[in-house]
Amino acid sequence: MASTRTYPLNSSFQPSYNMAVNLVGQVGRERSRNMLESSFAQFQADRAVVGLVRQLRKHEDALDGYAKAAECHLGDFMEYASLRRELSDAEKRAARGRSARRRDEAVRSLERLRPGDIIRVPRGRHTGFAVVLDPGTGGDVPTPLVLTYNRQVKRVNAADFPAVVEPVGRLRIPKNFSARSAQSRRDLASSLRNKLDEGEAEPPPRHAREDEGEEPEITRLRRELRAHPCHGCADREDHARWAERYFRLSKETEGLRRRVEGRSHVIARTFDRVCGVLQDLNYLDGDAVTGEGRLLAKVYSELDLLVAECLRRGLWEELDPVDLAACVASLVYESRRSDDAFPRVPDGAPADTLAEMERLWGELHEVEREHRVSFLREPDLGFVWTAYRWARGDRLDRILMDADMPAGDFVRTAKQLIDMLGQIADAAPAEGTVRENARSAMDLVRRGVVAYSSVG
């Protein structure tokens, strides 16, 4: 190892439910939090923040310089600059509102068009006069079919009309007109040109644009701006440039500050959220570990909390060893994407219990979501039928053929199942049936190639 190149050592540590109850039970909640703050995982997280903090300090120093450069002898120029920005934002909002209203009016005017209306397309690829063949109002937005002055049949839409479109005249469309017929297009285009040349199609009179009036907010801001002492400064625009730089950098700085806060103390914050879940479910009571918490402390699995809840609620009490092995298999197996999306499960008690386990996982998932953590994956049924057949004594070759699973994957998952059954046997209450059934299930699974590989 000394002679080879170095590889980065990255921590994959994160607090878990089992770890939380064990830590709190040994040293208390506050000391556990302090210990996690000193962990290698937190050290790496904090080290990643160092560059961001250095950049944040540079931004803050630059902000001080910009603010000083924008100072005005007549008054608070940053206050004046804030008014200018507020006014600019209000004017942009008002302009967007006017544009939206004009678009809506243009769309409504397109909806009023009829076949034979002569219109002027003000922009787009088909600019010029055209006659409407079909209003095209069947969809959400009208797309009229028109014959242009140049004998082209095209569809236009609201993007071609920045303002209200009004017919400038009408043209009778022959009943035998066909848009696919070149002769029909030529004849109708000729009629359109004649009508335009004769002056029968006149543009509608332009109406004076209605004064929409200035919004009260814009009027107020302009009045306050003119009344501000800095408005009369001879160097006003120079100060304004420095103030604008200040505001732009301030926005970037705020984003950096949020990133730093999000990465600092991340391990301890996650631990607090985990403890919040355990507190809600009565596994912790402040700094004290409850009886249910001591049960959870004996389960070492990524689905530790689900195992503990299954034991706590007695979901497995009515299962025999074979059925128990099948149900517990859903806690140790993770399917590949190519596996069967609807795996087979045994009928009767195992199917009902598996449904209850999935419902229970849904409840725990909601509790996790409330505390902004997500540690518990959904139970996976991909190995359930295989584990059931193996526990009841079926031959390995038939099981592997039906499951389309390599022998190595089968043995590895079966050994994980034995380990999980052993943890359940240790954690289960002595007065129930689960403890003995879990041990019996271990013996049923630990046979043949599984037992041999365990010894090897």
Image (spheres, helix red, strand yellow):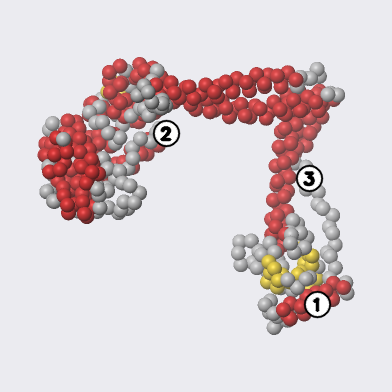
Q: Name the outermost residue toward the right.
A: 198
Q: In the depicted view, which residue is nearer to us: 358 or 160?
A: 160
x%, y% of residue 225?
79, 30
Residue type at tag 3: Gly
Vertical position of residue 367 compared to residue 96: above or below: above
Secondary structure of the residue carrying numbered label 1 = helix
User: Is residue 417 visible to us here?
Assistant: no
x%, y% of residue 349?
18, 49
- Upstream in the sequence, badge 3 or badge 1? 1
Residue type at tag 1: Ser
Residue behind mark 3: 213
Residue behind mark 2: 372
The residue at 53%/28% (across/down) is 259
Residue type at tag 2: Arg
Residue behind mark 1: 190
Gap between marks 3 and 2 measured at Cα: 48 Å
Gap between marks 1 and 2 measured at Cα: 71 Å
The residue at 71%/68% (across/down) is 113
Left or right of residue 195: residue 417:
left
